[in-house]
Image (cartoon, helix red, strand yellow):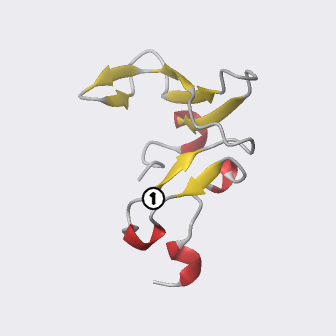
Amino acid sequence: MSNQQSNRLGRTYLEGVTVAENPENRMEQEWTGKLQTKEGRAQFRLYYNGGPMDDLFVVTDYAPQLIVAEDPADGARYLLFDGCKHGYNALN
């Protein structure tokens, strides 16, 4: 595994708001990191379309999956996943 791969910061559309954690433990299908603002805040409110099932957000018949994180300090919103834009398996 190259150094560039082991230090991936996650999805490119989240660059600037992700921090790698334990990149040495990264597996091919898994990103080890967290969402964090430039100011260092790492707690967010999550908003989603879809339904919870076994601690996962799943698609429903009435709407595509959509997951957004909101920084409670300044109200900034970060799109984490959009089933229409990113596809059904983009989180893999």
Residue found at x 64% / y 37%:
41
**Pointer 1: residues within 10 angstroms few (<14), some, or many (20+)?**
many
- The N terminus sits in image quarter: bottom left
- Furthest residue in direction left, as rendered: 54
Q: Which one is nearer the viewer's eye here, 86 or 37? A: 37
Q: Quadrant of residue 82?
A: top right
Query: Whole-percent x and y of residue 51?
Result: 37, 19
Q: Which one is nearer the viewer's eye here, 58 or 30? A: 30
Q: How many marks?
A: 1
Q: Type of residue at label 1?
A: Trp
Residue found at x 64% / y 35%:
79
Q: Quadrant of residue 32?
A: bottom left
Q: Is residue 23 left or right of residue 74?
A: left
Q: Which one is nearer the viewer's eye here, 35 or 2? A: 35
Q: Is residue 53 left or right of residue 57?
A: left
Please give the residue where the numbered disc 1 appears in the rendered image.
31
Residue found at x 41% / y 53%:
92
* Residue 16 versus residue 77 in the image, above or below: below
Residue found at x 72% / y 51%:
16
Q: Is residue 59 left or right of residue 71?
A: left
Query: Whole-percent x and y of residue 64?
Result: 49, 26
Q: Secondary structure at mark 1?
A: loop
- Furthest residue in direction front, as rendered: 40
Query: Whole-percent x and y of residue 67?
Result: 53, 29
Q: Is residue 75 left or right of residue 41?
A: right
- Furthest residue in direction top, as rendered: 62
Q: Quadrant of residue 28?
A: bottom left
* Residue 44 versus residue 31 in the image, above or below: above
